[in-house]
């Protein structure tokens, strides 16, 4: 396996100490996308908020700093959940599981964050459908992915483990998962020189 393929595999499913170190590095690299997502989320006190693919818990910590919410996080990486538990303590309820297996007892949510996770959504739309089902009527999804044009320049993203999107493709994936086209807003954001991201706001 090439170095770029190993890197892509760790991004898809961080494992062990290398996965923990990569998660911390990604927190630094994704500082601006996280801030933009929290601004778009506009959390309010008392809301039930899920971070789907919560990683190290950085986004949940940022939400907690903004408003007193009921926080939940799910990630299929045991390494990431361990870091998130250490970071958040009793501030959040966490589970090591695939998003598609989200505990029904947690539902419904007022809002869901999905930051840098839709790259790993299956072509059948099961992940997005799970996110859609997890929201109450009127609930909102805030998502972030880096634009296809940027991702295509990075060798690890060509390993076949990442699903790439432009705005049209991202809207199509959300519609396939159950979101109405009219409820979806996708905004281009310059993250750094030469790096463009997409911020999604979609309502159930």
Image: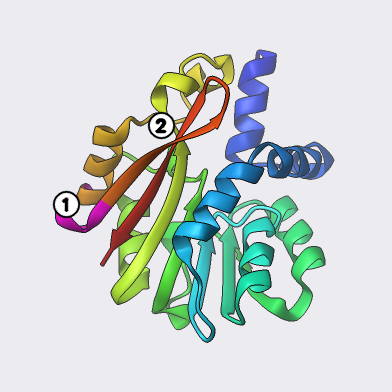
Task: Inspect this view and state whether residue 98 appears.
Answer: no
Q: Which residue is mark 1?
A: 181
The residue that disc 2 covers is 163
Residue occupying the point 54% across, 59% down: 38
Q: Earlier in the sequence, mark 1 or mark 2?
A: 2
Residue 14 location, x and y as percent? Answer: 68, 42
User: Mark 1 against mark 2, which lies toward the viewer?
Assistant: 1
- 108 above or below 200? below
- Is residue 180 magenta-colored? yes
Q: Could you say where residue 21 lies in the image, as x and y percent from the top left?
A: 81, 40
Q: Residue sitting at 43 percent across and 44 percent down?
A: 118
Q: What is the secondary structure assignment of the residue under circle 2?
A: loop
Q: Is residue 93 left or right of residue 107?
A: right
Instruction: From the viewer's perspective, tell me whether residue 35 is left or right of residue 178.
Output: right
Near mark 2 (Cα within 10 A), the count class, few <14, some 14-19 or many ≥20, is some
Q: Residue at x 48, y 23 (%)?
A: 151
Residue positioned 62% across, 35% down in the render? 11
């Amino acid at each position: 396996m090439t170095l770029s393929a190993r890197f892509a595999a760790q991004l898809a499913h961080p494992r062990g100490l290398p996965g923990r170190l990569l998660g911390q590095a990604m927190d630094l690299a994704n500082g601006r996308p996280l801030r933009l997502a929290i601004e778009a989320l506009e959390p309010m006190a008392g809301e039930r908020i899920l971070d789907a693919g919560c990683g190290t818990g950085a986004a949940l910590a940022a939400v907690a700093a903004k408003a007193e919410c009921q926080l939940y996080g799910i990630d299929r990486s045991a390494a990431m959940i361990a870091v998130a538990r250490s970071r958040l303590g009793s501030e959040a309820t966490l589970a090591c599981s695939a998003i598609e297996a989200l505990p029904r007892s947690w539902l419904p949510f007022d809002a869901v964050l999905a930051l840098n996770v839709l790259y790993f959504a299956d072509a059948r739309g099961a992940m997005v459908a799970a996110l859609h089902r997890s929201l109450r009527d009127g609930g909102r999804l805030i998502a972030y992915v880096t634009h296809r044009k940027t991702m295509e320049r990075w060798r690890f993203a060509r390993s076949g483990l990442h699903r790439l999107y432009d705005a049209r493709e991202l809207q199509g994936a959300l519609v396939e998962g159950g979101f109405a086209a009219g409820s979806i807003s996708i905004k281009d954001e310059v993250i750094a020189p030469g790096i463009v991201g997409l911020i999604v706001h979609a309502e159930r």
